[in-house]
Image: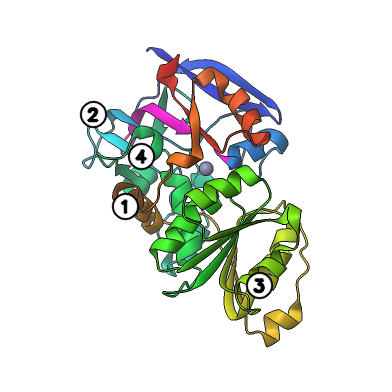
């Protein structure tokens, strides 16, 4: 049996490249040769401080696109040589939540996470092959196809935000998620996008991708900015993708009476957030927590890349070989790059 390289997460601040056997597919499984594994903010968070779902030592990386090298018994929809992309989890389809059409809350979703895409080869388990593995559209590069998983999450946030045709949508946080969400929001009917961030570089990317107005919270009160841009009312819809208790609080204050706020970014366990109960109650505001993706939003993400509805190119700041995963995450931490494509073939 021949071996391959794989990056392992050992403990916060510590990764290791290991030589391990190339996986072989069991029934219903698919093995792919990784062309691209994109770096992700979740990997960075986990690398820095550990993660609820990370059980080290563990294979690292979860975004991927590649070529099928082997299929297990019973796999009919994929064969050797197929270019594929997809998500790294899948719901069970039969639990309490799945039966109610809420697969992102599936009781087994956390156990379904498949890690190890920072490697030469990656095995996809049966439940993911069946639900969340897709053929890569021909007009989408491997590097861009690596965005399917994060884009499926971004889509899930936006389609649950009740955006109406002609709405003004404020998005807080021009990271990869916010930059994808603004494009999805536009394509589902938002007339105006207001992007709130901090660093000017990111806000310029947002502007280049079509934000109508951008605002740095280093320069003033973002709530006042949104009010000013909306005749004092507030935005029809606000999506919080910045990831702090402070921005959660602000997001609620930015929405108009009767509007919808999606609290999209995850905060560390136990975080308490204060909010204006008067605005929520008397303002008839809807506040939703949205997490993760569904098989339907994975499908939508593949379509969005194929149709060009979402342009991910400005979020990809270059390619690195497997040996540089750690360095790449540190560059993300310093906000030098948004995302990097880890391409094993580069070394
Ligand atoms: Zn990710
Ligand atoms: Zn389930």
Horizontal side of residue 144 vs 77, given as left or right: right
Q: How far apart are marks 2 and 1 (CA)?
A: 23 Å
Q: Distance between the residues labelled 3 and 4?
A: 42 Å
Could you say which quadrant of the image residue 74 lies in? top left
Residue wearing tag 3:
228
Q: What stretch is highlighted in magenta?
A: 26-40
SS state under label 2: loop
Q: In which quarter of the image is the C terminus?
A: top left
Residue placed most toward the observer, 8 or 248: 248
Q: Residues within 10 Å of mark 1 (few under 14, many from 20)?
A: some
Residue wearing tag 1:
303
Residue drawn at x 57%, y 78% as measured from the top left: 259
Q: Is residue 146 above or below residue 188?
A: above
Residue wearing tag 4:
85
Q: Which of marks 3 and 4 is nearer the N terminus?
A: 4
SS state under label 1: helix
Residue drawn at x 31%, y 52% as measured from the top left: 303
* Viewer-nearest of discs 2 and 1: 1
Q: Quadrant of the N terminus?
A: top left
Q: Residues within 10 Å of mark 2 (few under 14, many from 20)?
A: few
Residue drawn at x 57%, y 25% as measured from the top left: 325
Q: How far apart are marks 2 and 3 (CA)?
A: 56 Å
Q: How far apart are marks 3 and 1 (CA)?
A: 36 Å
């Amino acid at each position: 049996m021949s071996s391959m390289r794989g990056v392992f997460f050992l403990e916060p601040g510590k990764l290791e490249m290991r030589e391990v056997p190339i996986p072989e597919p069991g029934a219903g499984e698919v093995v792919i040769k990784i062309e691209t594994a994109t770096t992700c903010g979740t990997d960075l968070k986990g690398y820095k401080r550990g993660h609820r779902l990370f059980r080290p030592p563990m294979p690292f990386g979860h975004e991927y696109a590649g070529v099928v090298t082997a299929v297990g018994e019973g796999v009919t929809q994929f064969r050797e040589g197929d270019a594929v992309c997809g998500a790294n989890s899948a719901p069970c389809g039969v639990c309490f939540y799945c039966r109610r059409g809420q697969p992102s809350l599936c009781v087994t979703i956390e156990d379904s996470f498949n890690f190890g895409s920072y490697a030469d080869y990656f095995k996809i388990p049966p439940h993911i092959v069946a639900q969340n593995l897709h053929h890569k559209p021909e007009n989408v590069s491997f590097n861009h196809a690596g965005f399917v998983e994060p884009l499926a999450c971004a889509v899930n946030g936006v389609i649950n935000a009740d955006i109406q045709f002609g709405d003004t949508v404020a998005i807080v946080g021009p990271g990869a998620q916010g930059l994808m969400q603004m494009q999805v929001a536009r394509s589902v009917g938002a007339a105006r996008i207001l992007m709130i961030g901090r660093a000017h570089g990111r806000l310029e990317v947002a502007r280049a991708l079509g934000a109508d107005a951008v605002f740095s919270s280093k320069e003033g009160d973002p709530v006042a900015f949104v009010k000013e841009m909306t005749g004092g009312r507030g935005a029809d819809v606000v999506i919080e993708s910045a990831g702090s208790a402070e921005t959660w609080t602000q997001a609620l204050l930015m929405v108009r009476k009767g509007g919808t706020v999606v609290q999209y970014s995850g905060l560390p366990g136990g975080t308490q957030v204060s909010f204006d109960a008067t605005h929520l109650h008397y303002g008839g505001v809807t506040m939703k927590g949205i997490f993760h993706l569904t098989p339907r939003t994975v499908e939508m993400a593949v379509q969005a890349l194929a149709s060009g509805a979402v342009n991910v190119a400005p979020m990809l700041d270059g390619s690195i070989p497997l040996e540089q995963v750690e360095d790449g995450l540190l560059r993300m931490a310093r906000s030098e790059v948004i995302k990097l494509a880890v391409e094993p073939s580069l070394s």
